[in-house]
Image: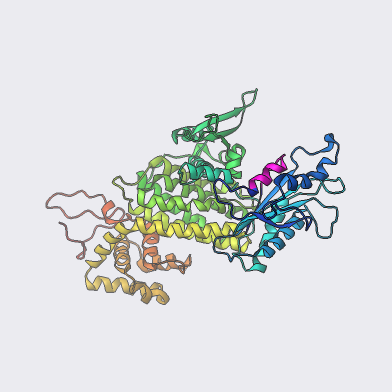
Amino acid sequence: MIPCVQKRASRTVGLVFYLYEPGRCEEHTDPHLVAAWDAFAPDPGRHPDATYADLARLLDQPVDALVPSRRPKQHVWHLSVRNSPEDPLLTDEQWADIARRMVAATGIAPTGDDTACRWAAVRHADDHIHIVATLVREDGRRPRLNNDAARAQAEARLLEAEYGLRQLNPGDGTAANRPTSAERHKAARENRPQTPREELRETVRHAAAGTLNETEFFDRLTAAGLVVHQRVAPSGDLLGYKVALPDDRNHDGEPVFYAGSTLAPDLSLPRIRKRWDTGDPEGVRDASAGSRWPGPAGARRRAATAMWQALLVVDHGTDEEIAARITGVGEVLDALATTSATPTRSELRQAFLFERATRSHTQAVHGHDRALRQAARDLVGSGPVLGGGKDGASTAMVIDMAFFLVTAAVHWHARKNHAQQAAAARQSAEHLRAAYRAAAQHPMAVLRQRGGRLTRPRLLRQAAHLRTAVPELAEQILAEPGWPALAATLTDIGAAGHQPATLLAEATARRELDTADSISDVLVWRLRRAAELPADLEQIPVTRNATSPARALPGHRTETRPDRPRQR
C-alpha cells in the first residue's frame, strides 16, 4: 500500500472535479464516496441531484468562515492511497476504514475529535482511493500536520498486515523523490522508457563517479548531453546546479530543470563536494601508471582489489567505515555501467538500484572510500575493455567481486534494520549475477577448454590440492562444470611459484561462498587476482617465433609443462 501526500492546492472544486471526471491518463470507473467527515455528505457520483460544487462548498465552509486575511492560501490537502496489483480487491467498506485510519493518523481528523477538518474519500478505481480535505478545523484552528507523509506510511504498514496486502519496507526519509503522477503520465505520452527525473538521476550519478572537482563534474554532465544551469552568487561563488534533458520541454517550450538535490539527497552540490574535499589530488595516479596490467583491464583488476579490501572492512569495520565503503562501491558500479559492453551494460544499468543502498542515516566518513573512488575514476578514464560488443575476463572478475560486496551490504543493512536499503541491495545483487553471466561466458569457456586439455596426472594433482585446502567443499567443486577452469588456474598458480593449496585455503576462508552459483567460478577470479595472473589465456602477451617455446605467464617461472595447450 502506497500513500502519497500530493502538492497542496487552492481550489477544492477543481480537485473534486478531477476525482469524479472520466479521467485523462487512466480511466475513472464509477467514482463515488466511500467515506467522509459526515455520513450525509453529498455524493455527485451516486446522487443525481448532488453536484461537484455542492461537495466542494461543504468542504470549504470552515475555510470560508474565517476572515480573508486568516484563510490559508493553499488550503486543499490531497492524499492518494494505492494498493499493489497483486493485492486482493478491497470492498468499499474496507476502503472506508482505510480512509478513516489515514485521516486519523495524519492529523486531519483524529479519532474522537468532533471539531476536526472536513474530508471526503473518493474511489474511482479498484486499487486506490483519493482523500481530499480542507485545512481549517471546525473550530477555526489549523490542523497539526507535521510529518503527515511519514505518519501515513507508518499507518500503511499496519494496514498491510491487517488486510493481508503486500508488505512494503518502511521508509527512513533518505530515499530520492519519486516521479509524480504528472511526470509518469507525460513520459507515457512521449513513449519514454523512464521519466526525465529518473533518467537525469542516473545520468548525474554516473557523471559524478570518480570526479575530482567541479570542472570535471560539469564537463561530464555536458558531455552526457544534458542542459546544465549553474546557480552563481553575486560574489561569483557557485551555489548549486540544475539539469534538464534537451527534449523535455514545458508548455512554453522551455527545458524542464531539476535541481541536483531534487534528484537525490546525495546529488546536491554540497554533498558532491564532500567527495572532493576528502580526496587526495596529490595522490591521484594515472589509470595505468606503475601497473603490470595497464589499460582498461588493469583498471578492472585494481577495482576488484579495492572491492576485496572493502569487503574485509564490511566484515569487521565500524558502521561509519562500512557506510563509506558502500557509498564507494556505488560509484564503482556507476563507472562499470558506463564502460562495459552492451550485453553486460544492460544488467549493470539495472544494478543502479544499489544507489538506494548508499544512503542511510549512518553517516559515511568519505575519506574511507578513497580507494573505491579512485577505482571508479580509473574505470571511467580507461574506458571499455574491448570493442566488438563483448567484455574481457577482467570485467567478469570485477563484477564477481562486486556481487559479494553488494551481498555483504545486504547483510549489514539488514542487521541495522535498513529495510529499503537491504531490499535495493538485494535486487542489485540479482542484476549483478546476470551481468556476471553475460561477461564470464566467453572467458570461462576459454579457461575450461584449457583445463580440459590438462593431462590426467595434472588434474589429479590439482584435485589433491583442492581436497587438502578445502575438504568440505572439494567434492562439490569437482562436480561443477567450472572445475576444469579452476584446475587450469591452479596449474598457472603453481607455475608462477605459488602454493595452490595455500592460496585456495585463503580464498575460501576469508569469505562465505553460499550465495555463489558456482564456487569454482568464484575461486577462479579470486585466485587469479590474488596471484596476479592474467584473467584468461587470451590476455597473455606472447612473443615467439616459429621455433621458440611459448612465453611463460607474467610472473611465472619458466618451466616445461607437458600439459600446455597445443599451439595452432
Where 311 falls versus 478 (above or below)? Answer: above
Magenta segment boundaries in residue numbering = 6-18
Q: Quadrant of the C terminus?
A: bottom left
Residue 539: in magenta span: no
Q: How is the image coloured?
A: rainbow
Tell me if residue 205 can be seen: no
Q: Quadrant of the N terminus?
A: bottom right
Residue 242 x/y as whole percent? 57, 34
**Residue at 75% across, 42% down:** 75
Residue 229 x/y as whole percent? 55, 30
Q: How many marks?
A: 0
| Residue, far right | 139
| Residue, far left | 547
Relative to the observer, which residue lies in front, 297 or 548?
297
| Residue, far front | 49
Tell me if residue 390 can be seen: yes
Residue 283 x/y as whole percent? 49, 39
